[in-house]
Image (cartoon, grey):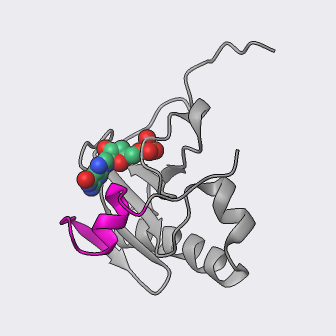
Amino acid sequence: MEPVYDDNNVFAKILRGEIPCRKVYEDDYALAFHDINPRAPVHVLVIPKGKYVNMIDFHRRASDEEIAGFFRAVGRTAAELGLEARGYRFLANNGADANQEVGHFHVHIFGGAPLGAMIGRVRGEG
Ligand code: 5GP
């Protein structure tokens, strides 16, 4: 199924300034802000300025410039947060199996403490 972008998703509203956020970093390609429900001492979301549902959509439709700009912004956000000395994790949930809740592509940055195992063990069907 093709991802369909909904202009009323919460991150679209943040980009339009209709909902406030605690901004960390912004440039032409991306906006970064603190997650409202943090899962680590530092939990920040980085979103592209363009309208993309998730990575499935982003890698298909975004220009090379947007992709490069976005992932550079992820790195710069982590640097601004002072996470480079001790390290950090980033991840993106894409689609149903990953429990993606908000339909605007976003990367989570976690840090500020040892983060433990990469993922809990998952029992697959296949
Ligand atoms: P997902 O499960 O889609 O990867 O993650 C969505 C994230 O967005 C969750 O971690 C959730 O806490 C965060 N979130 C949802 N609504 C808001 C909001 O209005 N403001 C901020 N800053 N974060 C939000």
Left or right of 69 on screen, residue 123: right
Residue 55 in the figure: left or right of residue 19? right
Asked if 52 appears above or below 101 in the picture, the reply is below
Residue 93 at what x, y percent from top left?
A: 54, 43
Which corner quadrant holds the C terminus?
A: top right
Task: Identify the residue at horizontal 62%, vertical 52% (top origin).
Answer: 3
Rendered location of residue 107, percent (x, y) = 49, 56
- Residue 8 seen in this snapshot: yes
Compared across the picture, whether 20 is left or right of 97 comes to left
Query: Residue, x 39% and y 49% (percent of image)?
Result: 111
Find residue 62 and report its horizontal and vertical position in percent.
Answer: 67, 73
Residue at (21, 69) in percent of width and height: 18
Q: Give above or below for 6 relative to 125.
A: below
Residue 114, percent from left and from top: 41, 39
- Specify start and end residues of the magenta stretch as a single range: 7-24
Name the outermost residue toward the left.
20
The picture quadrant where one finds residue 122 is: top right
Residue nearest the viewer, comparing 65 with 121: 65
Residue in view at x 25 percent, y 42 percent: 37
Judge whether residue 42 can be spotted in this image: no
Along the line of sight, the residue nearer the viewer: 41 or 9: 9
Give the number of callouts. 0
- On the rendered image, what quadrant is the N terminus found in? top right
Q: Does the magenta stretch include residue 11?
A: yes
Residue that lies at the very extreme toward the right in this rendered image:
126
Is 8 above or below relative to 50?
above
25 magenta-colored? no
